[in-house]
Amino acid sequence: MNTPVSAHKFSRLRSRMPLWAQLVVMLTFVTTALLSFILLRDYQNNRRSIIDRQISTSGHLLDLELQNLDQYIKELTSFCLQPLYDNDLSRILSAKEPLSQTDETYVLNQMRTYFFSRNDLNGYQICRLADGSVYGRSGQIQHFRKLSDGTAFPDEAVTASSEGKYFHAILPSEQKNGFFDYYQSIIRIKNKQPAAVIRLEINRSFAAALNQSHAANGEFLCILNQNGQLLFSGSELLDDIDSDTLKKISEIASAQSASIEIDGKKWLCISCLDDRFGMQLVSFCPIQQIDAQISFILKSSLLLGMLTWLLAAFATVLIVRLTTAPLTAFSRRMKEVGNGNFSPIEENGGSRELLALSRSFNEMVSHIDELINQNYVSEINEKTARLAALEAQLNPHFLYNTLQAIGTEALLNDQPQINRMLASLAANLRYSIKGGDPVRLKDEIVYVNNYIMLQKIRFEERLHVQIGISGEYDNFLIPKISIQTLVENSILHGFDDTTESISIHIRASRKGDLLQIQVTDDGCGIDEPHLKELKSEFQNYLTPGHIGKIGLANLYSRLQILYQGKASLEIESSPHQGTSVTLLLPATTVLTEVPR
């Protein structure tokens, strides 16, 4: 049921569109679809390319860093095996009986010498497996001494360092600022059994140096041991990481890269695994950073696509308009005929069909023109004569001369008051009918004074008007009957049943390149609903076909026409507070006298 209705609506829409517009829409749609497909494909290719480049760059950097870490662990191994090159220290550590005071002092002195030869250690301890005694210092204990049993090495560390190929173990640090704890077994040469275990508490200096190159690019590095335990993280995001997420990170080594979400933020993780010690380096790159690079490329592609689209649209419009130009010209000529222009068109249609159509059209226009000459013109002339007669009857000059005659008669009969009223009314009538708009400010003030004089006869002492306009503004141009309209508005909205009198002030001033004319009163004011209605009338007066009220709405409309939006009319009012109307218009002057 809906299909025929939709088809009918579409058909009506097409019938209202010109042929060139339909062709432009169709070709533009095809061009837009094609460009959108190309941009989408380029976006996907660029995204894959940027991600692959990020993985390749980070992977190469991780390989280099992993080589440095491998070398670093080898140096730690060599450092731990120094007691083997000291015969006395090696003998003491391998002895099964308890150590004497002299032996303990010797062990502590040698350990102190070893410790201060490096700057990356928080602690250094040696555990003799024969009696479980531990010597050295830790992060909390700053002096080398025989430590209490509470600092005994973890069983997993002793076990791990007593087995395997390299007799060492790397476990997470127990210190807040530690990198990891390195355990190395000292093996007896005779029976190949562990005699002691050395623990090095490594600080974060080496790991922080590795993380610097990543931090400079908005990334961070984390390091895991052979058991998937977190040794170092360059970000606080992994401080309280759960075991499941940590397991996912450790499993990235097989895939080399993966996407992981941590605390609502997505990261691209690139991993590299050390075959020798089982250490795993993982670089975390924010997906947002990659998207920013893609966004830049996308914006460039969109800009290029937009330019291409504009060029294609321009070419489409140009070609279509050139093709349909004869039809457009023919349609425009038909409108001119409808407006009364019955001259024939040139027979240059651009095609055989259009040429035949233009000939038929010329014949029709010629026939219509002949009929109009016979009937319509005579009817128009008759109506024109009637209008001219009516205009003569209502000629304003006749009214002006009549008022002058009545004023003279009043003066002859000793009625000066009536004479002044008629003179003011006649002057204002003459001012209103004479040509010219805008007018000089001083001429408008004369008109306003005459108007005020007539109003004071009506309101007597209830009306007070003060004009405070300097003579320097006399030659500034303003719309005719504009100030009088503002004064009339003050009188109209200023008096009510409770108002005894009203004072009106008229001022003029400069405001930059604008002339400001302000009319204020202390009357009863305008309430909010009526004020909104009055302001809405400003816009309604500009609507075609709307019959607006005269007064401020009429003045607002004239301002928009005379000054093309460069002038404004502002009104402010509150009940029992009075009303202020401000007229702002470009400050222009005349240098010569304007004839009265």
Image (tube, rainbow, N blue to C red):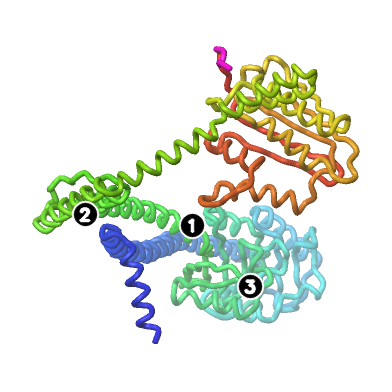
Q: Is residue 363 magenta?
A: no
Mark carried by residue 171: 3
Give the alpha-carbon distance from disc 2 to disc 1, as whole Å. 50 Å
Question: Which mark's residue is nearer the viewer, 2 or 1?
Answer: 2
The x and y percentages for residue 285 are: 52, 62
Give the alpha-carbon distance from disc 2 to disc 3, as whole Å. 87 Å
Q: Residue at x 50, y 35 (%)?
A: 391
Q: Write down the residue under mark 1.
A: 292
Query: Which residue type carries mark 2?
Result: Leu
Instruction: Please report contact status of discs 2 and 3: CB closer than 8 Å, yes or no.
Output: no
Q: Quadrant of the N terminus?
A: bottom left
Instruction: Please report contact status of discs 1 and 3: CB closer than 8 Å, yes or no.
Output: no
Closer to the camera in the image, 568 or 234: 568
Query: Which residue type carries mark 1?
Result: Ala
Q: Quadrant of the C terminus?
A: top right
Closer to the camera in the image, 92 or 565: 565
Give the alpha-carbon distance from disc 1 to disc 3, as whole Å. 38 Å
Which residue range is magenta in the image? 592-596
Q: Choose top left, top right, bottom left or bottom right for residue 431.
A: top right
Label 1 packing within 10 angstroms: few (<14), some (14-19), many (20+): few
Query: Which residue type carries mark 3?
Result: Leu
The x and y percentages for residue 381 are: 35, 41
Against 32, residue 518 (above or below) is above
The x and y percentages for residue 276 are: 48, 71
Q: Write down the residue under mark 2.
A: 327
SS majority, magenta:
loop
Relative to 327, 558 lies left or right: right
- Is residue 322 visible in the rendered image? The answer is no
Q: Residue at x 61, y 41 (%)?
A: 554
Instruction: Please report contact status of discs 2 and 1: CB closer than 8 Å, yes or no.
Output: no
Relative to 315, 488 lies left or right: right
Mark before the other along the chain sequence, 2 or 1: 1
